[in-house]
Amino acid sequence: MQHREAQLYGVMAEFETVRQFLHAAEQVRDAGYKHMDAYAPFPVEGLTEALGLGRNKVALVTLLGGLCGGLGGFGFEYWVNVISYPMNVAGRPLNSWPAFIPVTFELTILGASLSAVFGMLALNKLPQPHHPLFNVARFKRASNDKFFLCIESHDPKFHLEETARFMQSVNAQHVTEVRDED
């Protein structure tokens, strides 16, 4: 059996308080790092701005899913009643759009809700049963009381020693090299 060397995933810094964590995230962003992620035991207000992340795309995915569902439902009813199986009942128009509203509404809601769930999972790259950070013993505290900031090795500005030194300079309590050991 051949053993392969673990690949470097990045450098992770541990912080004690929310204030230190947010300040460090801002400093990392201002230093020009682009490929980083933050881990906290609870939602931290202002973290998205501190990391310099763009707008959340789940709302757009939900809107597009709702539009597709609604237009698909209305189009299907139109196709069935006007094109495929037209039936003139008491001289009413074949395209009686008020009768199509309940199905159109329900399929709009169905399309929006399904696209919101699956879009959120896809944008968050979930499910992810293994992540290189799980190899770091200290990372278990991320769900209890510690805050972690990780700069990934594929960042154009990443250099192992310089990045580790920089993470120490932003008052990290502990800095760890993260390797993907599969």
Image (spheres, rainbow, N blue to C red):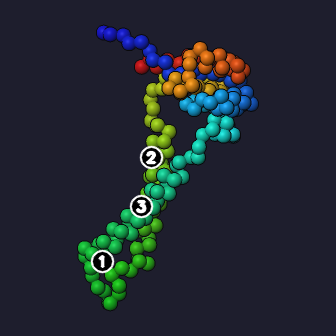
Q: Do tag 2 and tag 1 residues touch (Cβ < 8 Å)? A: no
Mark 3: amino acid: Gly
Q: Which residue is mark 2?
A: 118
Neighbours of disc 2 within 10 Å: few (<14), some (14-19), many (20+):
some
Q: Give the left or right position of residue 111, taking residue 94 as reference.
A: right
- Answer with the quarter of the image where residue 20 lies: top right
Q: Which residue is mark 1?
A: 82
| Residue 82: image location, x then y, percent | 30, 77
Neighbours of disc 3 within 10 Å: few (<14), some (14-19), many (20+):
many
Neighbours of disc 1 within 10 Å: few (<14), some (14-19), many (20+):
some
Quarter of the picture containing the N terminus is top left
Q: Nearer the viewer, residue 79 or 98?
A: 79
Quarter of the picture containing the C terminus is top left
Mark 2: amino acid: Phe
Q: Which residue is mark 3?
A: 69
Q: Which of disc 3 and disc 2 is earlier in sequence?
A: 3
Which residue is at 57% across, 30% downward? 36
- Answer with the quarter of the image where residue 26 lies: top right
Which residue is at 42% across, 68% downward? 104
Q: What is the distance, in whole Å, between disc 2 and disc 3 at their CAs?
A: 15 Å
Which residue is at 30% across, 86% downward? 89
Mark 1: amino acid: Val
